[in-house]
Image (cartoon, helix red, strand yellow):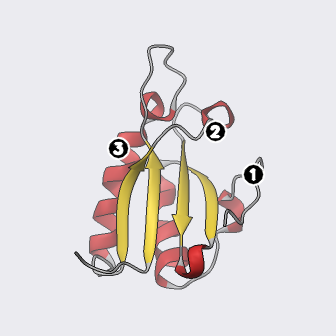
Amino acid sequence: MPNYSKHVQVCDVEKDDGKHCGNKGGAEIKKEFVRMVSKYGLRKDVYVSSAGCTSQHRLCEMDQCSVIVYGPNGEGTWYIAKSEDVETIVREHLAEGKKVESLVNEGLSTNVN
């Protein structure tokens, strides 16, 4: 198994209430992360997976979902993202190592050690 240096967890949980991230496009956003990670040549460094419900769906609009990006040393950043935000997160955070402050989930601490 590869030794990834970064991990992206995308909430794609669907519930009957229609209010969870999976109901708001989480699966599509996860697919976009996989596509962008490949586009930027980061497949050996970045693992993309689903996250269980993070209870952040109440902060997300109908075209957003909760995303957690873990980097070296377990440092994590919580984002609320739309599909069109994914390339920015991949390019700036995963490729260049800079948080995308405009997309940080203000409802949570940005450090989730």
Q: Which mark is residue 56?
A: 2
Percent of width and height locating residue 67: 53, 53
Q: Which amino acid does label 3 sit on?
A: Glu
Task: Give the Cα distance between marks 1 and 2.
Answer: 9 Å
Q: Residue at x 75, y 51 (%)?
A: 108
Q: What residue type is labelled 2?
A: Gln
Percent of width and height locating residue 48: 36, 61
State left or right for residue 112 relative to residue 23: right
Q: Is mark 3 on a helix, strand or loop?
A: helix
Q: Nearer the viewer, residue 109 or 86?
A: 109
Asked whether disc 1 touches disc 2, contact meaning CB atoms under 8 Å apart, the reply is: yes
Q: Which residue is drawn at 54% across and 41% down?
A: 64
Q: Is mark 1 on a helix, strand or loop?
A: loop
Q: Which residue is drawn at 70% across and 52% down?
A: 105
Tell me the residue that label 3 is attached to: 28
Percent of width and height locating residue 56: 64, 38
* Image vertical order of residue 44 relative to residue 88, above or below: below
Q: For the C terminus, which image quadrant? A: bottom right
Q: Is mark 2 on a helix, strand or loop?
A: loop
Percent of width and height locating residue 93: 55, 75
CA neighbours of label 1 inside 10 A, class few (<14), some (14 to 19), many (20+): few
Q: Residue 52 carries which label?
A: none
Q: Which amino acid does label 1 sit on?
A: Leu
* Image vertical order of residue 58 relative to residue 72, above or below: above
Q: For the N terminus, which image quadrant? A: bottom left
Q: Which of 102 and 5 is in front in this view?
A: 5
Q: Which residue is drawn at 77% across and 47% down?
A: 107
Tell me the residue that label 1 is attached to: 108
Locate residue 25: give its quadrant: top left
Say which label, 3 or 2, has the lower sequence index.
3
Say which label, 1 or 2, has the lower sequence index.
2
